[in-house]
Image (cartoon, rainbow, N blue to C red):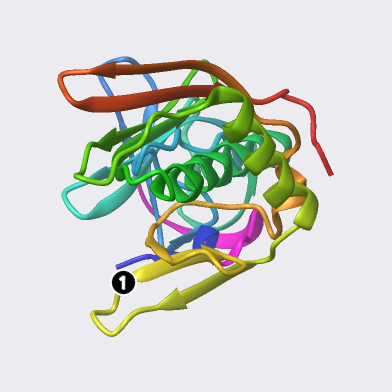
Amino acid sequence: MEKNLYLSGITEHEVEVISCEKLENLHFKIVLNQTPFHPQGGGQPSDLGTIDESEVMHVSFENGKIIHECKQAVPLGQVYAKVNQQQRHFHSRLHSAGHLIGHIVETYGWQPIKAQHWPSDAKVQFNATEKSEEIDPIQLKSLLKQSIEADFPAHISINKDGFREIAFGHFSAYPCGGTHVQSLAEIGEIKIQKIEIKKGKLSIRYALEAGDAG
């Protein structure tokens, strides 16, 4: 199995091309021995960038392997892979913002169940519990701002079951295979776009400015 360099925050590295197959859409399916590219999954879009001189259009899991769909063929052997760092940082900010919303809304008695961290459609969903309280948008925004200004650092660990977990400051760890900011100040302002409850489920939609916050 290839080594997932992206889990360590690496965005560029020398890699070995194991295979390169032409697809029906005339793009190429590339498999590497190790990759700095985060594949789409866990609610996070895939990284983009280049392998050698070929543009990476999409990265995904397929039958246990990480597949890089590229515009041009890439020669087998040693090449250089580089992720679009500005896009990676934006995706990391969005992902960490989703975690922070989850942590804060948990204090209102709601149980986070799933999330997606897409630039144009980011949201976190929750199940109601016996302790669930109404969410005050102004208070929520204030609590998010307080945590971001406190700039709690990220802590990545492996739990007893072998799963990667991410935590910020005093908040509990969430299992996660995504990329994140090093500390919360990097997120910048979180804009809460919509709060709605439907069939007992709470959805909170949010957005960030695309430019780097820090």
Q: Is residue 210 visible?
A: yes
Q: Is residue 170 left or right of residue 1?
A: right
Q: Which residue is mark 1?
A: 163
The image shows residue 166 at horizontal and vertical percentages of 48, 64
Residue 124, by quadrant, is top left
Task: Residue 116: say if magenta.
Answer: no
Which residue occupies the foreground of this view, 8 or 148? 148
> Relative to 157, does residue 120 appear above or below in the rendering?
above
The image shows residue 134 at horizontal and vertical percentages of 39, 29
Q: Is residue 200 left or right of residue 7?
A: left
Residue at 43% x, 25% y: name it. 204
Q: Is residue 88 left or right of residue 162?
A: right
Task: Residue 18: say if magenta.
Answer: yes
Which residue occupies the foreground of this view, 117 or 167? 167
Predominant SS of the magenta segment: strand
The image shows residue 70 at horizontal and vertical percentages of 46, 31
Q: Is residue 207 visible?
A: no
Q: Amino acid at mark 1?
A: Phe
Which residue occupies the foreground of this view, 194 or 173? 194
Q: Residue furthest bottom?
A: 160
Residue 201, by quadrant, is top left
Residue at 52% x, 71% y: name it. 156
Mark 1 residue crowding within 10 angstroms, few (<14) / some (14–19) / many (20+): few
**The N terminus - image quarter:** bottom left
Q: How many marks?
A: 1
SS state under label 1? loop
**The C terminus - image quarter:** top right
The image shows residue 32 at horizontal and vertical percentages of 42, 56
Magenta span of residues: 8-19
